[in-house]
Amino acid sequence: MEALVASKEIVVVCGPGGVGKTTVAAALASMSACHQGGKVLVVTVDPARRLSQALGLGRVHSGGANRVPPEAFAAAGVTPRGELWAEMLDTKSSWDALVSRHAPDGATARRILDNSLYKNISERFVQSHDYIAVERLFELHSEGNYDLIVVDTPPTRNAVDFLLAPERMAEFFSSRLLKLLTVPYRSRLADTAARPFYYVADRVLGTKFLEDITEFFILFQTLSEGFVQRAKEVERLLADRRTTFVVVSSLETVPVREAEAFLRLLPTRGLHAGGLVLNRVLPSYMLDAALATRAEELSARAGALASELCSAGGPLAGYDPSLVERVLEELGSNFDNVTVVAKRETAQRSELSGLQAVVADVPELGEDVHDLGGVLDVGRYVWS
Ligand SMILES: Nc1ncnc2c1ncn2[C@@H]1O[C@H](COP(=O)(O)OP(=O)(O)OP(=O)(O)O)[C@@H](O)[C@H]1O
Ligand SMILES: [Mg+2]
């Protein structure tokens, strides 16, 4: 993974929801800042609150990158060779910047930015996170301020959404839906079939709101050329050799299936899958046959062992042997259950590993990753 990251300018960390993408993105970026030096940026989408504080993002609301203070590294016991910067994706201000860039003139840009529908949805365009993330990546890369940019991707329903975002944006502008939405409000009322709908919509939403919707989409259409052009450039950047995709997954059935589909899709779209991080996996010693035998013995001989341990002079003298027996039985059978999971994980792993050259395992850590020390702990596993 270290060699992979060393040869790239952009690392896109993607994968199913909730598997640890944000954590792994922060881990890769901080390891690179520590060991490879240079200026490294991690663009994150929705870090858990404590992680965002650890990255110095707690105070930032308006976008823009923040340097993770060297003291944070010192507290984790390391002296980085380079600098780590972090930025939280700000959908609202990214949309505003896009509108201003692509609008045919200042007045149109103003009208879009002032449109009440736009104001409402640009803050809540949850699905547009995908598009904005790639957009912002493109911008940051063109500015050329960083040696490496690691991008965390949004929690989409499906990891593939992120890849298709630029293409979908381009399609949207030529869609029938957009044409329908931009039929002027007045002529809609002339349509007898649609009249009952508009009557109710008027009552519920208000004429002003309906007019705003139409105006918004009419104005939005003026952005078409710039957006489509830009979407193509963004796609080219994602497919560039300097960009690599690192897929994160756990070894549970559903995420594995999604990660597998993703790994198969990447090359068909000309994108380069560079690595696979298997997060929160069980340690390989769970598959040790000798350990399993001992666990079985523990369950089978729990009664005898308990009396021995609780006998006078034994380590548990004075304890109730029947309780100790139950604890031992429970331990043995729990080990057995976890072994079953470990075996299943091995099967899942072999399905995924065949698709990917660089595979890193990260075990379940004792606690949530909430500071730079924890991020670096994950990083050490990912790195080697
Ligand atoms: N190896 C690990 N050991 C322990 N906790 C972990 C590990 N990896 C991630 N976590 C914890 O799991 C939670 C989810 O991780 P994270 O936010 O990175 O996932 P995500 O894939 O970005 O989720 P989403 O799809 O919602 O964006 C966090 O609280 C994180 O601290
Ligand atoms: Mg996340």
Image (tube, rainbow, N blue to C red):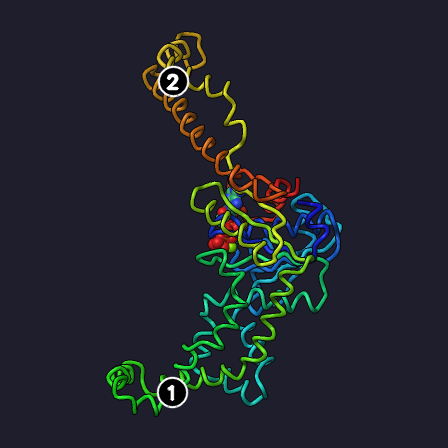
Name the side, left or right, on which 156 lies relative to 143: left
Rendered image quadrant of residue 356: top right
Instruction: Residue 31: give x, y in percent of width and height.
Output: 67, 47
Q: Which numbered marker is on residue 211?
A: 1
Name the side, left or right, on which 71 lies relative to 281: right
Residue under the image location 53 percent in, 84 percent down: 222
Say few, some or many: other residues with alpha carbon within 10 Å of mark 1 (under 14 / 14 to 19 / 20 or more): some
Q: Viewer-nearest of labels 1 and 2?
A: 1
The answer to which of 232 and 27 lies nearer the viewer is 232
Asked whether residue 318 appears in the rendered view, the answer is no
**According to the image, label 2 marks what residue?**
299
Q: Tell me the amino acid under the disc marked 1.
A: Glu
Say few, some or many: other residues with alpha carbon within 10 Å of mark 2 (under 14 / 14 to 19 / 20 or more): many
Residue under the image location 57 percent in, 75 percent down: 228
Instruction: Residue 235: give x, y in percent of width and height.
Output: 60, 65
Residue under the image location 66 percent in, 50 percent down: 30
The answer to which of 133 and 259 lies nearer the viewer is 259
SS type, badge 2: helix
Above or below, 290 against 250 in this view is above
Name the side, left or right, on which 331 lies relative to 194: right
Residue under the image location 49 percent in, 60 percent down: 161
Above or below, 331 against 307 in this view is below
Instruction: Residue 211: give x, y in percent of width and height.
Output: 38, 87
Q: Quadrant of the N terminus?
A: top right
Q: Which numbered marker is on residue 177?
A: none
Instruction: Residue 257: give x, y in percent of width and height.
Output: 46, 46
Residue at the far front in the pictured view: 268
Q: Tell me the amino acid under the disc marked 2.
A: Ser
Asked if disc 1 and disc 2 are in contact, CB closer than 8 Å, the reply is no
Asked whether residue 20 appears in the rendered view, the answer is yes
The answer to which of 191 and 19 lies nearer the viewer is 191
Give the mark nearer the N terminus: 1 vs 2.
1
